[in-house]
Structure formats: C-alpha cells, structure tokens
Amino acid sequence: MTTPTTSLAPRDLLARWEEQQSAYVAHRENRFEVMLDVLRLHSPAEPTVLDLACGPGSIADRVLARLPGSRVVAADYDPVLARLAETVLGEYGERATVIDADLAEPGWSRRFTEWSFDAVLTSTALHWLSPQQLLGVYTELAAILPPGAVLLNADHLRFGAEHPTLAEMSARHDEQVQQAAFAAGAGTWGEWWTLAGQLPDLARRIAERERRFADRPPQPLAPLAFHQAALRTAGFTEVGTVWQYLDDYVVFARR
C-alpha cells in the first residue's frame, strides 16, 4: 500500500482551512479582529494566551503574528489538527506550545498551571461539549486564571424556540453564505479532510482521530443565556458579549 502524498505545504493547508471555515461562519474574520482588539486593549503588550480547542492554530497564528512579544499555548484533542497546528506554529519557535488536552475529561487544566495566562481565546469549538462539560471547562478555567484575565468564546449560539423568527433568519443566512462561498470555489469540510489525508504526517493520525471521537455524538446546543450563567457560576466576575451577528457571538468574561 502506498502512502498518500501531496505537494500542499502545511501552511497552505491552514489557508484552505481558513477558506472552508469562512464558508460556514459568516464574518469569521470580524470575530478574530474583535478578539484581538480586546486582547490589545485589556491585556499586557506581550500577553500569554491560551488558545483553547485550537484546531489547526487559527487564533494562535493571528495572535503570534499580530503581537510579536506574545506567547501562545494551544490545546486540542484532535491529533490531526493539533499536529498541523504544531507544524505551522513551529515557525514562531519557543513562543508557541501545542498540548494534547481533552476538555471533556475533568482535570484537564492541570496541564496548564505552569503558565499565568492573560487571556483564553476559543472559536467554533466549545459547542462540541455538553452543557455539563461546558460548565466544567469554565470552572476549571476560572480556577487557573489570575484575577483580571479574560475569556473570549466565539461561536454560533443558536436561538431557541422563544425566538422563531430570529432562528429562521439565522439559518437562512447561514445557507446563503455557504451557497455563495461554495459557488465561488471554497472547499467543503469533507474536501478539506481529503486534502489533509494526503499529507503523510497527518494521514497516519487519522485512525487515532477516529478512535478518539467514535463515541462522541453532537451535543445539545447551549444558548447564550446558558454560557453567561455558567461563566458566572464558575467564578467569572464580569460577563457579557463584545460582538454579535445574528446568532453568532463573541462572549466575554473577566476573571
């Protein structure tokens, strides 16, 4: 059996990730700009940042490029995406660290206590957790963050049955954005994973990825009100939002 190969470089594969994610998340770059603005306005000039559920390193790459004195610890449980992040972020040398961490397992935060984080940033990831797991993650973060540190979570927080008009408009907008992006040539989620499987360094990790997520079905989506209540319950002292577009939010919490 021959090993799949492709001429696509890891950073090119990250660029393809950015393209396909932007097809599923309207105004995705605006999310990141707001997060970076909050980081710039609130945190030290050379912050230490935790990129939680980092995927291939989208947030970490932006922070490290935009803030030359910053340091980022990136964490993910997906062995394929974490390896891509490790490869791409390796360009930044010792300023970047990638750690394998399963947020669904209580006690995951023990691996991060050696750093004093100024901010935790995460995007399009925590919806994979159940409401109970989400409260656990927020509680563990509150325990390891120093006073004044901030958490920013960018994600779709769907409207519930009490907002049928908003829910319908948001779903229709998502469909229109995807149709336009794919018509313009953006790749789909499945097409991106086909490309990833052509890089030998990533392909050898796909079986482990499938094993890790085999028993993790999609979870009930937690609305904005749940996130805000869970953050307050966890011990964050100030909770709100810093950006919204239909049902897409950047949630803010200060320790």
Image (spheres, helix red, strand yellow):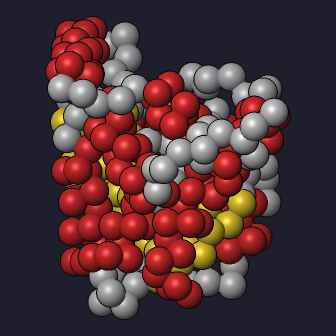
Is 51 situated left or right of 166 in this image?
A: right
Residue, far front: 2
Using the image as rendered, state which of residue 153 and residue 77 is in the foreground: 77
| Residue located at (24% from left, 27% from top) | 185
Query: Residue 4 in the image: x percent, y percent?
Result: 65, 39
Query: Residue 92 in the image: x percent, y percent?
Result: 46, 81
| Residue located at (23% from left, 50% from top) | 29
Is 201 situated left or right of 6 in this image?
A: right
Looking at the image, is 120 positioned above or below residue 243?
Answer: below
Using the image as rendered, state which of residue 177 and residue 205 is in the foreground: 205
Using the image as rendered, state which of residue 255 and residue 196 is in the foreground: 196
Using the image as rendered, state which of residue 7 and residue 43 is in the foreground: 7
Is 51 situated left or right of 143 in this image?
A: left
Q: Visible in this render: residue 125?
A: yes
| Residue located at (46% from left, 27% from top) | 191
Looking at the image, is 61 positioned above or below residue 207?
Answer: below
Total marks in image: 0
Q: Visible in this render: residue 103?
A: no
| Residue located at (81% from left, 33% from top) | 1
Looking at the image, is 124 positioned above or below residue 120?
Answer: above
Query: Residue 3 in the image: x percent, y percent?
Result: 72, 41
Query: Residue 158 in the image: x percent, y percent?
Result: 37, 25
Q: Quadrant of residue 161?
A: top left
